[in-house]
Image: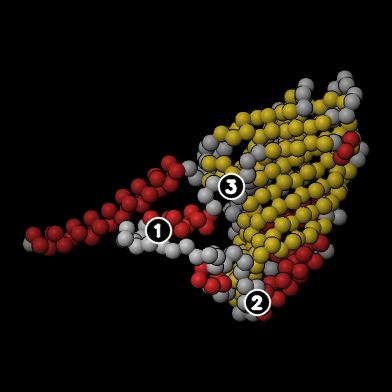
Amino acid sequence: MTDQMKSKGVPKAVLAVLLALSSSALSPSFAIEASTAATANGISEFSLEPDTSEHSQERKEIESLLSTIEGQWNAHNLDGVMSNYADDYINNDGLDKKAVTELTKDFWKTYPDAKSSSKTKQIRIDGPFATVESRDIAVGTTSKEMPGINTKGDLNSISEGQLYIKKTGNVWKIIGDRIDYEKVRVAFGLARQLQASFSAPEQVKSGKQYSAKLELNLPTGLTAVGSITNQVLEYPQPPPTEVWRPLDGPTLERVINANGNNRNELLMATIGITNAQRNALMGIEFLTRRLNVVPTMEELADKTAVRESHNESKVSSKAEPKNEKNEK
């Protein structure tokens, strides 16, 4: 998004069952007999593998839509791509159709040969709504050379997420999407052969600390400088405020506080490859990752308290006129 560029424990299905049972009025004398196979009484809607024979026509339409969008995107047909977006589209980063239009335009300007491909993992259909889970990759080359290095940069990115679409009449339109996982690499000069990894959690609670770590394996005779930055995902994305520091070892780690506004963040590690004297830049690499920020339990409790207080206030305001009438 810059110009350079399951959890273990109780399984979700089991957790959902436990929550349902804890809130029901089951008598202690009732017993639940386990089935030999978890097929939810044979109801396909609740099986682990959905019945793909259902909604076959809708699936064909959605697969055709996805193929069309990929073709238009790789042809850099902006009007064609955006015609598949609903006017009220908005994604989980709070970006609307206008912002995505400008981002796509800027991306193609920076990477004029960019191409993408997508692998559909699952399509779920419920009436006029559908959710597509996919893994997407993109590659490309920067339009300009990096000053001082005199080479163009190579782009590689991968992401996973969901696409939300809705059928109005006979037309499917994208009404939203969310990205759960995303990482991007752009490298210039000698950094194109650099072995480096950038690790960080994919999700953090609002306002909480987390650690981001950069690890690299430098060739003999070369040194490096680097930085790790974080900023809220927004458009337009401001340039990061970087503090370069010499990398005297193979690791650079930074402890960061997530923002307290439940806004997703962009993490970026920047690596500059220099000679032994650190007076000549010979390569540069940008590694970015997405951080999804979620509310804390305290924030959820506060919202519940505010909502309950509001409901009590409404009940009280409705009761007051009746009391006045009774007094009269």
Q: Secondary structure at mark 1?
A: helix
Give the Cα distance between marks 1 and 2.
32 Å
Mark 1 or 2, nearer chain start? 1
Residue 221 placement, left or right of 327: right
**Which residue corresponds to mark 2?**
53
Residue 288 percent location from the top left of the image? 72, 42
On the image, the x and y values in percent for residue 69 come to 75, 66
Relative to 280, 136 lies left or right: left
Can you see residue 43? yes
Q: Nearer the viewer, residue 326 or 276?
A: 276
Looking at the image, what colour scheme do you see? secondary structure
* Element marked by disc 2: loop
Is 156 located above or below residue 60 in the figure? above
Q: Amino acid at mark 2?
A: Ser
Mark closer to the observer (1, 2) = 1
Which residue: 59% across, 44% down?
Answer: 203
| Residue corresponding to mark 1 | 21
Residue 289 in the image: above or below residue 134: above
Disc 2 or 3, which lies upstream in sequence?
Answer: 3
Nearer to us: label 1 or label 3:
1
Amino acid beneath label 1? Leu
Query: Quadrant location of the C terminus?
Result: bottom left
Among the 4 quarters of the image, the one containing residue 95: bottom right
Q: 277 or 40, which lies in front?
A: 40
Residue 91 lies, with reference to residue 247, above or below; the image says: below
Query: Which numbered dot is residue 294?
Result: none
Task: Quickly name the residue at label 3.
Answer: 7
Cα–Cα span, label 2 and label 3? 31 Å
